[in-house]
Image (tube, rainbow, N blue to C red):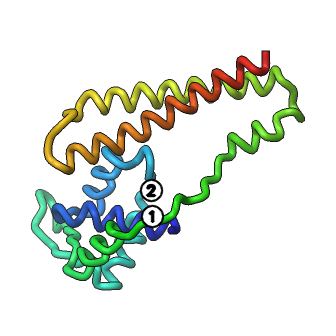
């Protein structure tokens, strides 16, 4: 499934719970799914425009503090598409990881430079792990279905970054 397709479903997911302006949608995404599905403002607005054109999202203008605000909400057709997408099993996607290409061809630059790259990457991974751990501390370990699934999603990210740190440490050890 393409990035656009998954972005459209992420947007439909957010709009299935509450109407949001484009700005509020961006804030909601930045506060939750940005670590595994980043999208910039232009991508969000382009996708919203497409969803409106397809009849999956509708727009309502409401009075804001200083001006009219456009609130987007999922239509019945949008909710049906989201439901169908959520229930469909999708194959594991191929990923592209530029860092692994660097490691694959790292012999061209020598062990010292490869170690420097690995150490820099480890620092980034440690920072991300700390971020995930901080977020995890704010999410209850149990609760309603949404809470449990949001925590599980976060823990998936945490486990991936922990695995990367372990892989880096093993690779550094092998290069000694």
Task: Give the SS element for disc 1.
Answer: helix
- State the residue lying farthest toward the right: 108
The quarter of the image holding the C terminus is: top right
Task: Count numbered badges in the picture.
Answer: 2
Q: Residue at x 41, y 59 (%)?
A: 41
Query: How dense is the environment of label 2, judged by Cα within 10 Å: few (below 14), some, or many (20 and up)?
Result: few
Mark carried by residue 43: 1
Residue 24 falls in image quadrant: bottom left
Residue 57 falls in image quadrant: bottom left
Marks 2 and 1, how far apart at CA: 5 Å
- State the residue lying farthest toward the bottom: 54
Q: Residue at x 25, y 78 (%)?
A: 80
Q: Residue at x 27, y 27 (%)?
A: 137
Residue 81 falls in image quadrant: bottom left
Q: Nearer the viewer, residue 146 or 102?
A: 146
Query: How dense is the environment of label 1, judged by Cα within 10 Å: few (below 14), some, or many (20 and up)?
Result: some
Task: Give the x, y percent position of residue 66.
Answer: 14, 59
* Label 2 with label 1: CB-CB less than 8 Å: yes
Mark carried by residue 163: none
Task: Give the x, y percent position of residue 79.
Answer: 24, 74
Q: Residue at x 67, y 23 (%)?
A: 170
Task: Give the x, y percent position of residue 146.
Answer: 21, 50
Mark carried by residue 40: 2
| Image vertical order of residue 30 relative to residue 86, above or below | above
Left or right: 103 in relation to 79:
right
Task: Give the SS element for disc 2.
Answer: loop
| Image vertical order of residue 26 relative to residue 103, above or below | below
Q: Nearer the viewer, residue 3 or 29?
A: 3
Task: Give the x, y percent position of residue 97.
Answer: 65, 47
């Amino acid at each position: 499934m393409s990035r656009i397709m998954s972005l459209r479903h992420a947007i439909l997911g957010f709009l299935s719970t509450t109407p949001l302006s484009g700005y509020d949608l961006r804030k909601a995404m930045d506060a939750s799914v940005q670590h595994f599905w980043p999208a910039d403002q232009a991508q969000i607005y382009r996708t919203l425009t497409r969803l409106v054109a397809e009849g999956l999202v509708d727009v309502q203008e409401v009075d804001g503090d200083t001006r009219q605000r456009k609130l987007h909400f999922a239509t019945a057709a949008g909710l049906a598409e989201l439901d169908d997408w959520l229930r469909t099993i999708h194959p594991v996607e191929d990923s592209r990881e530029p860092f692994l290409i660097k490691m694959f061809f790292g012999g061209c630059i020598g062990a010292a430079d490869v170690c420097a790259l690995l150490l820099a990457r480890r620092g980034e991974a440690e920072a991300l792990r700390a971020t995930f751990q901080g977020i995890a501390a704010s999410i209850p370990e149990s609760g309603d279905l949404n809470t449990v699934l949001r925590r599980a999603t976060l823990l998936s990210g945490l486990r991936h970054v922990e695995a990367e740190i372990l892989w880096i440490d093993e690779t550094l050890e092998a290069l000694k």
